Image: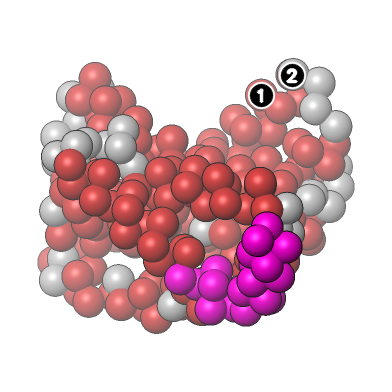
Amino acid sequence: MSTNLGRVWVYLAASPLLWLTATLLAYRIAYAIYARCRFHSLANPVAIAVALLLLVLVPTGTEYRTYFEGAQFVHFLLGPATVALAIPLYLQLDKLRRNGFALLASAFCGSAAAAASGMLVAAMLGASPAIVLSIAPKSVTTPIAMGVSETIGGLPSLTAVLVILTGILGAAGARYLFDWMKIREHSVRGFALGVTSHGIGTARGFQVSDEMGAFSGLGMGLSGVLTALFLPLALKWFGVI
């Protein structure tokens, strides 16, 4: 009986459809838990879905490459979803015009602080140069972060993990930091969340309000562009790479 089950598993594991289904099912379960917790930020559905998938991938010894052959269909949809963020952002056009320079300057400072603080902490803890460089682009969306990491001599796979962790921590904990700092305006909350916690933070922003989600998407986009353009140049300027 166990032999037959093993053969069935080998057959199913070779199909990309299995891992696509597993990914969608894991998120559906995670979202149900999130709703059950009344959408509390600490019950982040992305974190729960990742944990559920690990409970399957690790015991079965499934490599990430095999899993991604199925999950890449979800990954592909990130592109259209990101472009669609322009729609709610367009509705905030008046506010964008009034605060354009401040938003750009904030994105630049926030991106620089996110990269510098992560590298500094890693270096102080004795991390190797490759790990320090892998941490630098942790606050931007995964495709950009992995590309930047490879360019500057980091480890793209490690960077991808750090990006996900940064997003989850930001989406779960930013609310308490904003409350402590008495930051109430949704546009400010959203922009800060997007700059530091990319897509996962943006998803959390839309769950709070359309305004917060729109500005979070703007922060994510600006942070990604600025990091890709200036981080490699800055590291070369300071002789890090």
Q: Residue furthest front?
A: 1
Principal secondary structure, stretch drawn in magenta: helix
Q: Residue at x 33, y 49 (%)?
A: 30
Q: Position of residue 24 (x, y in %)?
A: 40, 66
Question: Residue at point 39% right, 62% down?
Answer: 25
Please report the bounds of the magenta region as a residue range: 1-21
* Residue 117 lies within the magenta run: no
Res 103 seen here: no
* Residue 19, picture quadrant: bottom right
Query: Mark 2 sits on what residue?
Result: 124
* Rendered location of residue 164, percent (x, y): 53, 48
Q: Observer-nearest residue: 40 or 28?
A: 28
The residue where tag 1 is placed is: 121
Give the number of marks: 2
The spot of residue 105 in percent (x, y) is 41, 49
Q: Dot 2 surroundings within 10 Å: few (below 14), some, or many (20 or more)?
A: few
Q: Is residue 171 visible?
A: yes
Expressed as whole percent of the image width and height from the top left, the position of residue 218 reads 34, 61
The kind of residue on which mark 2 rests is: Met
Q: CA distance from mark 2 to mark 1?
A: 5 Å
Q: Secondary structure at mark 1?
A: helix
Residue 233 occupies quadrant: bottom right
Looking at numbered disc 1 in the image, what kind of residue is underneath it? Val
Q: Secondary structure at mark 2?
A: helix
**Quadrant into which the N terminus falls:** bottom right
Quadrant hosting residue 112: top right
**Given contact means CB atoms under 8 Å apart, are the residues at marks 2 and 1 in contact?**
yes
Q: Is residue 72 above or below residue 52?
A: below
Q: Is residue 104 above or below residue 43?
A: below
Q: How crowded is the residue under tag 1: few (<14 C-alpha within 10 Å), some, or many (20+)? A: few
